[in-house]
Image (cartoon, rainbow, N blue to C red):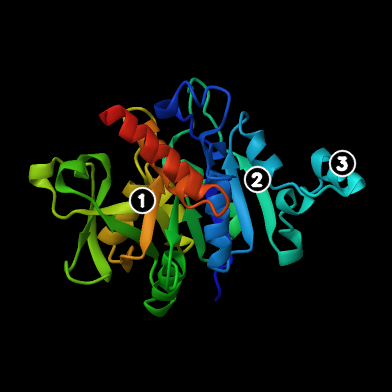
Amino acid sequence: MSINKAIVPVAGLGTRLLPTTKALAKEMLPVGRLPVIHHVVEELLAAGIRKILFVTAHNKGAITDHFDDGSELIRRLEAEQHDLLDSCRFNYRAQGVEFFSVLQHIAPGQHKPAGTGDAVAAGETFVSDEPFVVAFGDSFITTHSGKPLLQRMIDSHQSCRASCTIGAFTVPENRVHHYGILIPETTDQADVRLTGILEKPHPEQTPSRLAISARYIFSSAIFERIRNAHPSAGGEIYLTDAIDSLISAGAMVRAVCLNAAEKRHDIGNHLAYFESFVDYALDDPEWGEQIRAYILEKLARQRS
């Protein structure tokens, strides 16, 4: 069965990027000329995904508006036959792409969504019993050559008949406590079965440096595991707990690693955001060289 559906959780509050995200969804922050969520969607399309569900919140309407080819702006540009029309109308419908959205439930007495597992569970009706991708909306992966990570994940998931396949990347040992860390059967393969997951371990206790890249493929079996997961002290349902339950039950759970031609852009804090924006600014086909010259000139002045 082909995989053409994806759930994209975008309901997070973005507190680590305040005050920037007080009124602007972090997924709508520009990286280069496009918002973060646009890069995520392009990554999904490159892997053959054509039905995308945004799991959103009440203050995230700009995300669905961004992909609306029937907006007032588009209609005005069409009426004026404006030169900007081609750059603002993404023509996803012509490519057979469909967008959907659902609000992530916030339980009475709670002030935020109930975790990553709950976000994925909100898409159960959308995916039915089909395998599907999960791509969190605040990070994206660029592939400069070869088959993209998500496509390699889909190939592995199908050929190994896995219940879950996770995109993974290697982090420095002193950073493992910021990530969910995967425990592989072997450490010398780029596509490997997993024996466990450890959430944010201390560097001296980590079993590996293989971290979750916020890209997953699941069978529908994950929904029952999410329903049976125990909430944290803060009332959150963690997706990693549901995956660990699959592993404990003997299900095939695998990791596929980023390669040397790929880079993960994580917009989780201001430093990571600034780094990603600079990367894309320097690569801009029109202004990249001038931006590079500006940075070099500024650094030279600071040293003098």
Q: Position of residue 162 (x, y in %)?
A: 38, 70
Q: Residue at x 36, y 65 (%)?
A: 261
Answer with mark 1 or mark 3, whichever residue precedes in sequence: 3
Q: Residues within 10 Å of mark 1 (few under 14, many from 20)?
A: many
Q: Residue at x 88, y 49 (%)?
A: 81
Residue 268 visible: no
Which secondary structure lies at badge 3? helix
To which residue does mark 2 refer?
101
3D distance between C-alphas at marks 2 and 3: 25 Å
Q: How many marks?
A: 3
Which secondary structure lies at badge 1? helix
Q: Position of residue 135 (x, y in %)?
A: 48, 53
Q: Residues within 10 Å of mark 2 (few under 14, many from 20)?
A: many
Which quadrant holds residue 147?
Answer: bottom left
Answer with mark 1 or mark 2, whichever residue precedes in sequence: 2
To which residue does mark 1 refer?
242
